[in-house]
Structures are given as C-alpha cells and as structure tokens.
Image (cartoon, helix red, strand yellow):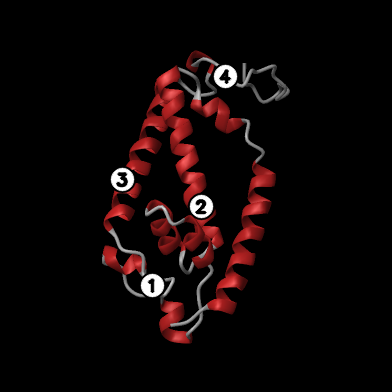
Amino acid sequence: MFGLGEPWVYNVSMAGVPVSQSPVAPWLDRVIAALLVVAAAIAIWLLATMVPDSRGHGTHEQLGMEPCGWAVHWGLPCPTCGVTTAACYLVHFSPWQAVKVQPFGTFVALAGLLLAVSGLLHLITGRSFMFRLAMLPYGTITSCTVLLLLGSWLYKYLTFTI
C-alpha cells in the first residue's frame, strides 16, 4: 500500500487510519507511540521537579550538566540557550514567561507535548500514529523550525545577561 511508486494522495478522514494500515508493522506503530508517551511523561516529571532559573538560562544545571560553554567562555548565548528553562516554565504553567525566556524552547516543548498527546490518543483509539506522522509536511516544518531557532537565537542574544 505504501510503496515508493504510489502517490501520497489518500482520502483519509480526520480520524486517521486503523493501525492495521500503518506504514510500519502494527506492533512497531504501537511501540513508537508508547515510547513517545513515556518519554514525554518522564520529561514533564523532570521539568516539574526543577525550578526555572531566573536568569533565563542554566536550568539544565539542576540535572547535573555543566554550565553552557558559550556563556562561560564568550559571555554569549548558544542557539539553544534557555530551551530547558522555557520548557520548565511551560510545565510550571507560566507560558508567557516561557516565551519571554526562549520562544524556540517554548515551541519545542509545546510540539513535544502535542506529539505525546497525539500518540496517546492514537494508542487509545487504535489508529496508526506512524501514518499520521508520515503525512506531516516536513519541508515546511523544518524551514519554519530553523527560522524560529535563528530568530530566537537573535532575540536571546539581544536580551542575554550572565
């Protein structure tokens, strides 16, 4: 059904397709969705146990990681500076603070949360999670994500304090 020669034009309702019509083995479709849900639950739990760093970066240090080398050596933010802090603010129900700290981090955290919810719903309803993923417009998503990352890096550069 999903051979390389076939066009990717399907009449699929918003409900999706049964897991039996997944582009991968049905058991693998379920395992991938379940692993995503478990990973998201662990990430949310970890972020909930942390306190967002008031500097807008450095929250990852609570996980035993080293301070960012860019900030230490050059006094400048790296492209993902503040992503963990933004995700932490989001989990602590402070979405505006998350956006102020790092717009890209907020986007990544929200995207991860939405993906996990989608995975859970697909597990519950017996629909194919991988089919839904295969239908995403990856070129558009990638372009927008790179632009948001670069824009957020510029924003972080202009608002960065050590």
Q: Is mark 4 on a helix, strand or loop?
A: loop
Q: Which mark is residue 15?
A: 4
| Mark 3: few/some/many CA within 10 Å (<14, 14-19, 20+) | few
- Residue at x 51% of width, y 78% of height: 160
- To which residue does mark 1 refer? 54
Q: Which mark is residue 42?
A: 3
Percent position (x, y) of residue 122? 46, 24
Q: Is residue 29 above or below residue 102?
A: above
Residue type at the position of mark 3: Ile
Residue type at the position of mark 2: Val
Is the Cβ of the residue at disc 3 closer than 8 Å to that at disc 1?
A: no
| Mark 2: few/some/many CA within 10 Å (<14, 14-19, 20+) | some
- To which residue does mark 2 refer? 108
Of label 4 and label 1, which has the lower sequence position? 4
Residue type at the position of mark 1: Ser
Q: What's the distance in space between the residues labelled 2 and 3, CA to CA?
A: 16 Å
Q: Is mark 2 on a helix, strand or loop?
A: helix
Question: Which image quarter: residue 154?
Answer: bottom right
- Residue at x 59% of width, y 66% of height: 152
Is the Cβ of the residue at disc 2 closer than 8 Å to that at disc 4?
A: no
